[in-house]
Every structure is written in structure tokens, then in C-alpha cells.
Amino acid sequence: MNAPFDAATAFGPDAATQPAPDHQIAVIGLGYIGLPTAAVLASFGWDVCGVDVSKDVVETVNAGGVHIEERDLDRLVSEATQSARLVASRHVPAAHYYMIAVPTPFGADKKPDISYVETAARSIAPNILPGACIIVESTSPVGTTERVAEIIAEVRPDLRMPKFGDEHGGDIAIAYCPERVLPGKIVHELVNNDRVVGGMTPACAQRASALYMSFVKGDCLITNSRVAETVKLVENSFRDVNIAFANELSMIADEIGVDVWDVIRLANRHPRVNILQPGPGVGGHCIAVDPWFLVAGAPKSARIVRTAREVNDHKAVHTENRIRALIDAAPDAKVALLGLAFKPDIDDFRESPALEIAANLCADLGERVLVVEPFTDDLPNTLAETGATLSGLDDALAQAEIVVVLVDHTAFKHLTPTDLAGKLVFDTRGMLKK
Ligand code: SAJ
């Protein structure tokens, strides 16, 4: 077992002289959720040690910088590191609270992979002291919080673990509290959204909610860990199903020859109808992934959830086919592809249908393609060797006879049908209609 918690080295010079109870937190994983959460906690007076396996990430954060683009994050991290409330490390210190915010990807079989959560639990176990609280925030299949307890118990037989459903807690508390912030609005939503806090026991839930009540303006809603795990999967599945309806409508509209944007705009004037927006497919590391966790847990029952995933995945294929039909109609024309990110105004390309479609087109058309993406300085790997060019918007429009809107970034929104007059245009987001 490592030496007991040393605030001066783990949390910066001031920490050791601030003996307020429960003021030290280790956030494991400094990604899209962990880093903003660590910085927000620091801004609310917590002494935060952000832990990441990446040396680059740790060095960047300790230098007051950020490795991801997110509104207000650079200012918050810079202030937090300057005040020494936030330090980054590759090692997990002892702390009063531990928050696990690592990725939970899925494999080729669409089954969830919780190995990063398991590794995080193993890294916490050696130093954890009685009275500490572990909170899992990573989107996880139901039962993952109990798996964390099992891992801690294996490493630390000296500690009494909380048991799911028991009235009282053990020597430590373990809870699940799903992140539910929207990329692009993370800092705002971290503070303002309601939180669902699920304990392995009621005592665990109370202990975990004390952390959230210190910085959340929304309500902290208490439940058990299994319900909280399910709530997260259900939230993203709800959105996926609703987007699938919009995407299916767009394909129906193509088939029967009506304008889907007009149909949705007018149908939404009914007081109880609220159809979402079709697009080139669904991306990001949440909505395109999490519903599969529900399907994996209940494969026979989760029929709409599975079908929605299939419809949204198919929408990318349908979109690519439509673009190819346009290209076939003008075989020598240059093609401008506007946007690669998974949604507007972010630099996140994970699971992006726009990127997938662009990569497939560039692989075949190479030098004919001009890619416009204000959120990158270089073409992503899948496009880099194809001969396609990363271009400014004006340049691309000057050269291309075919223009495809894949992402409705604000930087493209000033475009009007007049700017594109004479070109073959395919607007996958309905941007030019809005
Ligand atoms: N999309 C459409 N049409 C729409 C809305 C979205 O095609 O009408 C597409 C987007 O272009 C994008 C994808 O869906 O490709 C997902 O975007 P999003 O804005 O719906 O959601 P995310 O992935 O950025 O964030 C979601 C949020 N979940 C819900 O809204 C229920 C967020 O609150 C979660 O915290 C996040 O997933 C997460 O981390 O789980």
C-alpha cells in the first residue's frame, strides 16, 4: 500500500494548510467529462487531483492548458491551475472523493467494454481510506457500480464494502452518478443540470450527493445505483429513437418525393408533436453508443432501441448514396464537403457520420474533394493520404460545382441559396432552409 495522502504534493502547496473536511477529490480520466468536472470542482473550492494515463494530457493541464475544445474550459482550467486548486498527475492519490470519468467503449460485437472503469477501480483501491466515497460517472452497463465494489474488495479485504440493497453502508461509499452534459455547453450544464445520484445503499447515495450539492444548482435526485445506471442509458436511447424517427422520415420523404424540412416544420405546429431534425446520421461517443448497452442487457426486449440504432447507422449509408448520385451527374466537377465534426460548433469527430462519409468519398475521388472544417488545422488520418485538400470556405466555393453540407457549423450559416446559385447542392442538415 502507498504512503497516506500527502496534500502538499498531490494537491499543491496550499492544500496541506486547509484542513476542511472532505475537500480533496481525485478525478480519474481527464477527457471531455473529467477535465471540465475537475475544473468546475476546483472553481467551487475543492482541491482536485486530475488523474490521466496520458503524460501529454497531464503536462498540458499542469501548464494551465487544455487538450479539448469546449466553451469556457480554457479559462476555467487556467484559473484552477494558477490557484493550485487543480493539479494533474498520472497517479491516484488518497482523497475524500474519487470520481471515475473514463471511457466505456463497445467492441465489434456491440457489447460494452468496462475495462477502463475496472482499471480505475484497481488504481484507487490501494490508497483508499475508510470514509472515502467512489462515484462512477462513466456511462456504464447496469451492475458496473457493483463490479467496482467487487474490485475494491479483492484488493482491500480489510475494508467492509457496501452491499447493494442494504440499509446501511460499509467502510467506504460507492455510488453512480451519470454525466448528462451536452458537448458545447458542458461547463454551463455541469452546474445547472439536475443530477441523478444512485447509491449502492441509501447512505452511499447521501454521501455522494453531498459532493454534487456543493456545486450543482439543479436538484440532486437520490436513487439506487442500478436505477441511476439505467437512467443514463435510457436518456440517450430516448434521443436516439427520436432522431431515428426524423431520419426515417427523411428517407420516406426522399422516396415519396416531398420536402422533409417542410413536413417537419409544419407537423411541429401541432401542440403535441415535436419531431427532431434529420441529419447525415448520428455521431458522438454517447448517443451512437449507449443504446447498445441497453440492447446488450435485454436483447429480446430492446427492439425499438436496436432498430433506432440501425436506422440511424443506415442514414449515413443513404446520405452517401445520395451524394454519389449527385457526383455521378457531374463527373468532372470538384466537390466541397462542409463539416466533419459529429455536430455543429465542436471539434469532436468521434463516431462522426460526416467524417465517415467524407473518408469514403475521398478514398474514391481524392483530389476532386475540398474539405472545409473550421475546427481542425489538419485533415484527419482517414482523409490525409487521399489527395483531398483542407480548404477555406471561400476557396472551396470558388472551385467546387458540387456542395454538400454535412455539418451546420455557425461558420457556414451565412450561406444563402443565392451564394450557391448554379451549383449542385445537397444540404444534409436543412441548414439552407432555416
Ligand atoms: N442529431 C440529429 N438530429 C437532432 C439532434 C441531434 O441528427 O435533432 C445528431 C447530432 O448531429 C449528433 C448526434 O445526434 O450527431 C448526437 O448529438 P446530441 O446533441 O443529440 O447529443 P450529444 O451526443 O452531444 O450529447 C448527448 C446528450 N444526451 C441527451 O441529450 C439525452 C447529453 O446530455 C449527454 O450528456 C451526452 O449525450 C453523453 O455524454 O451521454
Image: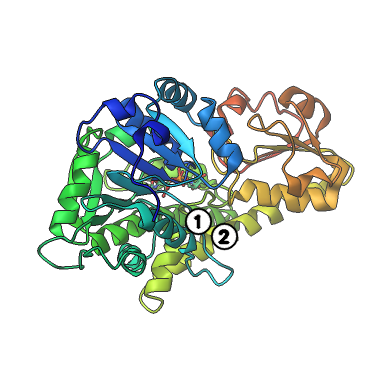
Whether pointer 1 and pointer 2 mark residues with C-beta atoms closer than 8 Å, the reply is yes
Quadrant location of the N terminus in the rendered image = bottom left
**Where's residue 56, x and y in %?**
61, 38
Q: Is residue 182 above or below residue 205?
A: above
Q: Is residue 95 visible?
A: yes
Mark sitting on residue 288: 1
Residue 93 falls left or right of residue 356: left
Residue named by callout 2? 313
**Where's residue 367, x and y in %?**
87, 41
Residue 387 falls left or right of residue 325: right
Residue situated furthest left in the rendering: 167
- Of the residues under marks 1 and 2, which one precedes in the sequence? 1
Q: Is residue 325 visible?
A: no
Residue at (33% x, 59% y) in the render: 234
Residue at (13% x, 57% y) in the render: 202
Judge by depth and name the residue closer to the eye, 121 or 209.
121
Q: Is residue 266 above or below residue 39?
A: below
Mark 1 or mark 2, whichever is nearer to me: 1
Q: Residues within 10 Å of mark 2 (few under 14, many from 20)?
A: some
Q: Check mark 2 vs ligand 1: CB closer than 8 Å? yes or no.
A: no
Three-letter amino acid code at the position of disc 1? Ala
Judge by depth and name the residue closer to the eye, 234 or 314.
234
Q: Residues within 10 Å of mark 1 (few under 14, many from 20)?
A: many
**Where's residue 354, x and y in %?**
64, 46
Q: Check mark 1 vs ligand 1: CB closer than 8 Å? yes or no.
A: yes
